[in-house]
Image (tube, grey):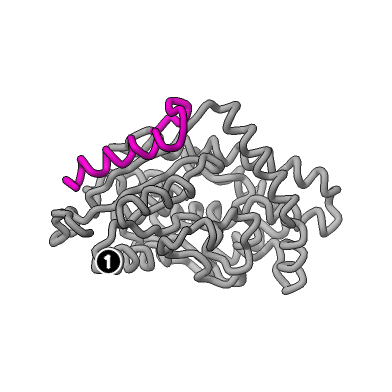
């Protein structure tokens, strides 16, 4: 970065600005504005924006919204691929290294807490190798008995993970059950908590956005209505015509799974919209719960700032002071 004196010679000294928080809090616009001010590049920490052709339901940052700022881990996978945290960690680490080599400041932006944690602490996933046969049996159980059966088992096996995982997120439920089975009963929530005690792999400035709960829920409802106006139903129809089903990880995302079920005749589209809003609000609540477990976080209450300029000035001052810019 021009004029900066940041030491990047050791892993723990490498800078990383993190902007996290629940959906619909304005992380995208704030990160782009700060990256422009501080010669930064942005790495997406969103589990849905990685998929090509899944733009509206993921609230993917558009080329216009990027304002020329380099963005990483957007449109890097087909919807038929099983994107996961291990792949994210590998590609995000490579992105950080490339950004620093270019003399730019890396920004990690998104609401997927596990992804952020994986990169920040360099979580070791070697203990989490998969058991193909056991996983297949769990997947079959989910198909025949429904996700609720697996979720009830997870509530008994690992209550902390059950609290953090949505009952319909079959992929993560199976992963948590699989980990417990392979580790001799160790809970994946305990594993994750232990990993959070590791020293960070980066010298991070970790912001988490929050705001009045009712205002946040209103913003979520408005955002969902806008997605529908922008053609979310048509987007899901197109993905469905390509052969994607509820079994694909990409189609289990909020917005996609509800509309897909409506198109399959389970309920009217109006009910799908209601469920998207409800599940998005629940997701926002879980996101906040996740980030409250993090240490060394700077909470940003958006209600404390009269406008975006005041918000950006405050965040920029903290970043500059931390890195001596």
202 lies above or below 216: below
Picture residue at 72% right of the left edge, 54% below the top: 230
**Quadrant occupied by the N terminus:** bottom left
229 lies above or below 68: above
Compared across the picture, whether 237 is left or right of 304 comes to right
Q: Which residue is mark 1?
A: 97
Compared across the picture, whether 263 is left or right of 58 comes to right
Residue 79 sits in which quadrant? Answer: bottom right
State the predominant SS element of the stretch in magenta.
helix
Picture residue at 42% right of the left edge, 44% below the top: 20
Q: What residue range appears in magenta?
A: 300-325
The answer to whether any part of residue 5 appears in the image is yes
Residue 213 position, x and y percent, is 55, 27
Picture residue at 23% right of the left edge, 44% below the top: 320
Residue 299 sits in which quadrant? Answer: top left
Q: Residues within 10 Å of mark 1 (few under 14, many from 20)?
A: some
**Per the image, is 294 magenta?**
no
The answer to whether any part of residue 111 appears in the image is no
Q: Nearer the viewer, residue 195 or 55?
A: 55
Residue 114 position, x and y percent, is 42, 50
Q: Nearer the viewer, residue 49 or 85?
A: 49
Residue 277 sits in which quadrant? Answer: top right
Residue 221 position, x and y percent, is 67, 38
**Per the image, is 304 magenta?**
yes
Picture residue at 46% right of the left edge, 66% below the top: 130
Q: Secondary structure at mark 1?
A: helix
Residue 62 position, x and y percent, is 56, 60
216 lies above or below 191: above
Tally the numbered discs.
1
């Amino acid at each position: 970065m021009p004029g900066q004196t940041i030491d990047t010679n050791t892993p723990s000294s490498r800078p990383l600005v993190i902007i996290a928080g629940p959906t619909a809090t304005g992380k995208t616009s704030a990160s782009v504005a700060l990256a422009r001010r501080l010669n930064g590049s942005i790495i997406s920490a969103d589990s849905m924006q990685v998929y090509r052709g899944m733009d509206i339901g993921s609230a993917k940052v558009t080329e216009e919204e990027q304002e020329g700022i380099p963005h990483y881990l957007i449109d890097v996978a087909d919807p038929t691929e099983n994107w996961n945290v291990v792949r994210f960690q590998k590609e995000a680490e490579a992105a950080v290294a490339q950004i620093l080599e270019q003399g730019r400041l890396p920004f990690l932006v998104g609401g997927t807490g596990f992804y952020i944690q994986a990169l920040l602490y360099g979580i070791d996933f070697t203990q989490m190798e998969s058991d193909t046969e056991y996983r297949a049996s769990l997947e079959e159980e989910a198909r025949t008995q429904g996700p609720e059966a697996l979720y009830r088992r997870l509530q008994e096996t690992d209550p902390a993970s059950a609290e953090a995982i949505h009952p319909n997120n079959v992929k993560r439920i199976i992963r948590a059950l699989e980990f417990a089975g392979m580790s001799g009963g160790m809970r994946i929530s305990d594993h994750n908590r232990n990993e959070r005690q590791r020293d960070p792999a980066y010298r991070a400035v970790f912001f988490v956005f929050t705001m009045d709960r009712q205002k946040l829920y209103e913003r979520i409802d408005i955002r969902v209505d806008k997605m529908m106006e922008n053609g979310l139903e048509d987007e899901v129809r197109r993905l469905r015509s390509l052969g994607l089903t509820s079994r694909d990880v990409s189609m289990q995302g909020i917005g996609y799974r509800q509309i897909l079920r409506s198109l399959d005749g389970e309920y009217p589209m109006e009910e799908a919209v209601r469920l998207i809003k409800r599940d998005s609000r629940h997701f926002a609540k879980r996101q906040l719960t996740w980030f409250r477990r993090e240490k060394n976080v700077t909470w940003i209450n958006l209600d404390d700032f009269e406008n975006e300029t005041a918000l950006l000035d405050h965040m920029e001052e903290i970043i500059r002071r931390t890195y001596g810019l």
